Image (cartoon, grey):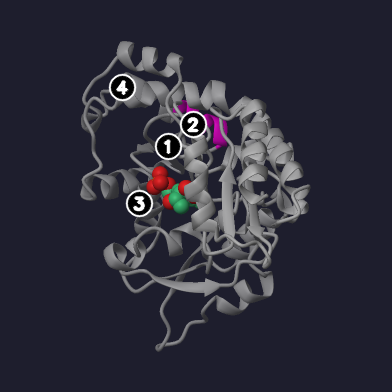
Amino acid sequence: MDRIDLRSDTVTWPTVEMRKAMAEAAVGDDVYGEDPTVNQLEADAARRLGKEAALFVSSGTMGNLAAILAHCGRGDEAIIGDKSHTFEHEVGGMAALGGVQPSLIPVQADGTLPLEAIRHAIRSEDVHYPTTRLIALENTQGSVGGIPIPKPYIDVVGALAHENGLLLHIDGARLFNAATALDCDVAELVAAADSVTFCLSKGLCAPVGSVLVGSHEFIHRARRVRKMLGGGTRQAGMLAAAGLIALHEMTGRLGDDHANARLLAEGLSELPQIDIDLDRVQTNMVFFSLRDDAEISAPELAERLKAHNIWIMAMDERQFRAVTHYWIRPEHVIEVLVALQEELS
Ligand code: TLP
């Protein structure tokens, strides 16, 4: 990449191997189910996540939306975190396009939704009430710092869902980061879920795409929703070819990104103008803020860093988010720390 870009892991460029695989990909018409590379990606992704079937979609947003629309009908309710990406950053798609009402539960600092609050939110049968249909979790939970949600909690939420005739969806945009941090097999991690979305295009470096997994019957319905959303693509094998490399070769190296996030976090903790909670740095995200006495705002500092070829996200007047990924090496982290020290002194 041509800059040190820590704004997100979505900024990653495809690797050289991906570009080559894309150029050489075997293709067909995927709406007819005839693209061999897409079919391989879907089969491999389903197997890897321990589910029956998978659907290649153009984004994490589309995967979550297709899942919600395939699980829920209009007027149904989905129990979901108030700081979840699906609720906050997906343009209200579940309500706008699915007529699905979110029932919001506060996301805790550890990324979980309190079990008692979930229990309380499940509607009983009453002529006045909407029908609760779905519980949705996010793993890693981005808004609280990319915190991985462990299997025992997911299993309990899955059991709670199923005992009450509900379904469990996981927005696993960074699911492989969670599995890496928890040192847990990814299929075991999501065993309790009825559907899972994971992104190929974040830390895994593919240029486009996410995968939605679940039962054969669910994926059949989700495929129809994807078509309705205009997401039925033709020679998508060009994209799936990069996705296959993402799935098979890039998932194993995410620990490097986590180590770089830790390196950055520890360096930041030495800077007197910065506040950071090191315990919250568990995957590839580093949230930190300027102390009250720092004489510069976060957006101003982010702007100044561009002169050092460093891009970082100011979340508000004081807070930043930095996300490590394949294109960030330890020497880049050192460059960032030196530039910050220079700008803050
Ligand atoms: N997140 C992006 C932005 O949209 C905020 C980022 O830079 O982190 N689920 C989660 C947990 C996500 O973080 C994202 C993207 C999505 C879903 C949506 O994925 P895309 O961008 O592929 O639609």
Which secondary structure dominates the residues rendered in magenta? helix
**How far apart are labels 3 and 4 at the CA level?**
22 Å
The part of the chain drawn in magenta is 43-50
Contact, CB < 8 Å: mark 2 with mark 3? no
Q: Mark 3 points at which residue?
A: 66
Q: Name the residue under label 4.
A: 238
- Which amino acid type is marked by label 2? Ala
Lower sequence index among marks 4 and 2: 2
**How far apart are labels 2 and 3 at the CA level?**
17 Å
* Residue 45 marker: 2
Q: Where is residue 134 in the image (x, y as percent from the top left)?
A: 48, 64
Quarter of the image for residue 251 reads top right
Contact, CB < 8 Å: mark 1 with mark 4? no
Lower sequence index among marks 2 and 3: 2
- Which amino acid type is marked by label 4? Met
CB at mark 4 closer than 8 A to ligand 1? no
207 vs 104, nearest the viewer: 207
Lower sequence index among marks 3 and 1: 1
Q: Mark 1 points at which residue?
A: 54
**How far apart are labels 1 and 4 at the CA level?**
18 Å
Residue 30 visible in the shown view: yes
Lower sequence index among marks 3 and 4: 3
- Which amino acid type is marked by label 3? Ala
**How far apart are labels 3 and 1 at the CA level?**
12 Å
Contact, CB < 8 Å: mark 2 with mark 1? yes
Q: In this rendering, which labeled residue sits more in front, label 3 or label 1?
A: 3
Contact, CB < 8 Å: mark 4 with mark 2? no
Numbered disc 2: secondary structure: helix
